[in-house]
Amino acid sequence: MSIATTAPGLTAGTWNIDPSHSEVTFAIRHLMTKVRGSFTDFSGTVTVAEDLASSTATAEIQMASLDTRNADRDAHVRSSDVLDVENHPAMTFTTKGIRAEGGDNYVDGELTIRGVTRPVTLEVEYHGVGDDPWGGVRAGFSATTTINRKDWGIEFNVPLSGDKALLGDKVDIHLEIQAVFSA
């Protein structure tokens, strides 16, 4: 199935992201393993068009809601060394296009972090639509991408012996989204 041409049950109109049933998570290499974290305060809207390829989405993530399960690390990541939350409290995403290639679905968009806007492509999986127990209609999506943090001016690192560094440059982003139809 191609979301760019068909998405059974996905009615044209506005779908609001339900943050209570959605996740925004990430992983970055730290020393020899990956540290995982999430953002717990976010919102967004998917506007489904009659022609699905013309649909749009916007999202805003509050950077202070970062949670890596370590308060000291979270405080440092929020600092001006990394995310500079005081001066850049939100990360935003806006679609620029939806397409299908070889059976896979992609959402091209612009991601803004620390005041820097760069293009990103999310690989998206559509899970369908269903009624919820509260009288609403929900759609489910998963999306993934990998970005290079340096593309957004996040340069902080600590050199280690040899040519190693404390942090990797690549950040894996994973979204699990439930959106509720509103009209």
Image (cartoon, helix red, strand yellow):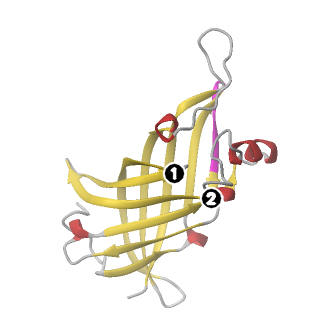
Amino acid type, label 1: Gly
Q: Please name the residue that numbered disc 2 is placed on.
A: 89
Magenta span covers which residues? 31-37
Measured along the vertical axis of the image, is residue 130 above or below residue 96?
below
Q: Position of 163 compared to 96: left or right? A: right
Q: Is residue 43 left or right of residue 122?
A: right
Asked if residue 1 shows in the view, the reply is no
Magenta segment's dominant SS is strand
Q: Where is residue 107 in the image (x, y as percent from the top left)?
A: 32, 56
* Residue 87: % across, % down: 64, 54
Q: x%, y% of residue 168? A: 57, 29
Q: In this view, does 55 lie to the left or right of 138?
A: left
Alpha carbons under labels 1 and 2: distance apart: 10 Å
Badge 1, how many Cα within 10 Å: few under 14, some, many 20+? Answer: some
Q: Which of 75 and 99 is in front in this view?
A: 75
In the rendered image, residue 84, in percent from the top left (x then y), is placed at 65, 48
